[in-house]
Amino acid sequence: MQPPRKSFVFAPAYDEKPNAANPNGRDATGGFHVGMKLWKQKYEKLGGTVVTCVFDNRQKNAARRAEILTALQRGCGGTWYDAFVYFGHGIPTGLPSAGFYMDDVGTLADAIYYYCDFNVKVLLYACSAGAPGGFTYRLADELGFMKNYGFAAYSHALDGHAFTNATVRRFPSNLGQTGITVAPAGKIAQWIKAMQDPKRELWAEFPFMTDEEIRNAV
């Protein structure tokens, strides 16, 4: 595994009211913030820099987007990011916690292009944003010219845990809107178990591993 040198990690500040996707009403403090904290601890311990943004998700969508993009710019300095990481709610057509939807894909793609390395890994720990033809597909399509340099975008195809959700898809790919299933063929059960093992932290490692390393890890 080649760990990221510099990460930009963002998540909503406030819990939303309980609903079907958030029955306990602790989506941010009990899920998204946990993932952010674990990421920061893990990769700073390995010598990386982690820039975090806990944005005000009580604002209107345009203000949320502006806060996130300003933090991305200010934290960049003279060193581009090689990991762009979101912990928050997702739907097939966007990242509702962050206020980014299909109409905003170009804006987000431009920001990633300006402030990230061409080999950046975009990690959207967001339910359903990785559905076929969804937000992650569209974002990766916008940045597809960077694929040969190592760029890839990941997200969850279905609803699940905030960051240990095993239904991970990688874009862009020759499979088009479906993306590539990250779980190794023939080892789905082992992949799910490894992703959910709190001692493994495979959920934070797999984007920086080769396919062979992932297969060996599960």
Image: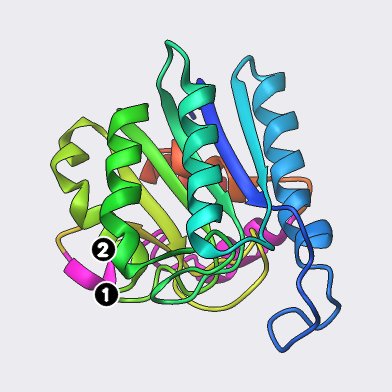
Q: Which image quarter: residue 170? A: bottom left
User: What x and y, as percent, mark residue 195?
Assistant: 63, 58
Q: Quick one: 45 or 31, which is closer to the camera? A: 31
Q: Considering only order in the chain, which callout, 2 or 1, is on the residue closer to the N terminus? A: 1
Location of residue 171 with respect to 27 vertically, above or below: above
Does residue 194 show up magenta in the picture?
Answer: yes
**Count of numbered marks:** 2
Type of amino acid at the residue the image marks with label 2 = Arg
Does residue 191 show up magenta in the picture?
Answer: yes
Give the magenta-colored segment's residue range.
175-197
User: What x and y, as percent, mark residue 128?
Assistant: 48, 74
Q: Is residue 22 left or right of residue 140?
A: right
In this view, the residue farthest toward the top is 78
User: How many other residues sit within 10 Å of disc 2, few (<14), some (14-19) or many (≥20)?
Assistant: many
User: What x and y, as percent, mark residue 206?
Assistant: 50, 45
User: What x and y, as percent, mark residue 173?
Assistant: 20, 57
Location of residue 45 with respect to 10 vertically, above or below: above
Asked whether the beta carbons under mark 1 and mark 2 sit within 8 Å of each other, the answer is yes
User: How many other residues sit within 10 Å of disc 1, few (<14), some (14-19) or many (≥20)?
Assistant: some
Q: CA distance from mark 1 to mark 2?
A: 7 Å
Q: Is residue 126 left or right of residue 149?
A: right
Location of residue 188 with respect to 73 vertically, above or below: below
Type of amino acid at the residue the image marks with label 1 = Gly
Q: Secondary structure at mark 2?
A: helix
Q: Which image quarter: residue 27? A: bottom right
Q: Secondary structure at mark 1?
A: loop
- Residue at the disc numbered 1: 133
What's the mark number on residue 138? 2
Q: Quick one: 88 or 181, which is closer to the camera? A: 88
Q: Is residue 145 left or right of residue 109?
A: left
